[in-house]
Amino acid sequence: MKKLELEVKTIEEAKQQAIKTFRINVDYIDFDIEEKKQFFGLKRSYKVSASVNVDVLDLGLNLLKTAFLNMDVDAKVEAHFDESNHQITYTVETNENPVLIGKNGKTLENIQFYLRNVLNIYTDKYVMVLVDIGGYKAHRQKQLEVLATKTAKEVIRTNIPAKLTPMNAFERRIIHTKLADWRDVVTASEGEKPNRYLVIKPKRR
Amino acid sequence: MAVNYEKLIKDLVTPLVIHPEDLEVKCLSEDDHMITMQVMVNTDDLGRVIGKNGRIANAIRTIAYASASRQHKKITINIDAF
């Protein structure tokens, strides 16, 4: 949790400083104010400790729920915080899964990106935020592993490198790890970011 | 099935801004196929709402777009500061 210790003349000043440092709305900041007595009582000053008062896990849960409510989608959202690797996972199950996943998981990816950015405004340590809708990611992983094995076998048979369609980092990683312990092929990612793709090459011996 | 896009976008943008009192979401035009929304934020918040390379703005657009596509509509969102 972010914290800030201040010594100021007025409480208003403390608020302004806290907003500037945290760059979030006042409603989310807690103030602990302690008045400091001076000798003649002429000069007043306050000792203020400000802290960010947000439960990130709940904030994300509420954001998702209200967003789905606004979209008129019936959704069940479950949140899970993994302490060991500082990771939050939201599992979503709705009656409109295909719409929310989008073409090639694009909408899902954007929901995850949006949520990751919003939640990390309120944290002092970076949290990884993952969103999964209707088990899409597990399904996609299986699909990619099948694709990887198939293409790799083809590459070994023909001895010709194969390019795969552009994918995001997460999806490329699945294929890299899948083929990492294969003797006869090597994998490499080529190209620039939105169109970065994976190449499976035969290993020369 | 009516979707309140103004509320949807407002709820998405609100946690990103420092000054929610300056946040304004308006519907500029709406017909059977197209909706145009205007989001006005405080100058201090503009950078964060747009994000690096406009990625947060695009994420918000994609979410709104998915919601609109259920009703076979298209939505565009303009983001600007006062």
Image: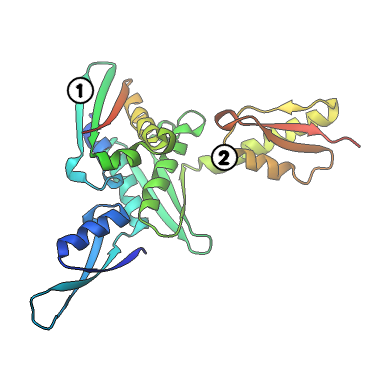
Q: Nearer the viewer, mark 1 or mark 2?
A: 1
Q: Which mark is residue B28?
A: 1
Q: Which mark is residue B18?
A: none
Q: Nearer the viewer, residue A182 or A192?
A: A192
Query: Dot 1: few (<14), some (14–19), or many (≥20) neighbours within 10 Å?
Result: few
Q: Secondary structure at mark 1?
A: strand
Quarter-wise, where is residue B46 in the image? top left
Q: Secondary structure at mark 2?
A: helix
**The C terminus of chain A lies in quadrant:** top right
The residue sitting at 84% across, 38% down in the picture is: A184
Amino acid bearing label 2 = His
Q: Is residue B35 left or right of residue A121?
A: left
Amino acid bearing label 1 = Leu
Q: Residue furthest top?
A: B32
The CA distance from mark 1 to mark 2 is 40 Å
User: Residue A161 placed where, x, y %?
Assistant: 78, 27
Quarter-wise, where is residue A11 in the image? bottom left
Residue B55 visible: yes
Chain letter for mark 1: B
**Which residue does the numbered mark 2 point to in the structure image?**
A139
Scheme by which the image is coloured: rainbow
The residue sitting at 31% across, 47% down in the picture is: A63
The residue sitting at 31% across, 45% down in the picture is: B16
User: Residue A31 placed where, x, y %?
Assistant: 22, 66
User: Residue A120 placed where, x, y %?
Assistant: 40, 52
Query: Dot 2: few (<14), some (14–19), or many (≥20) neighbours within 10 Å?
Result: few
Q: Against A16, is A201 above or below?
A: above
User: Residue B64 placed where, x, y %?
Assistant: 33, 31
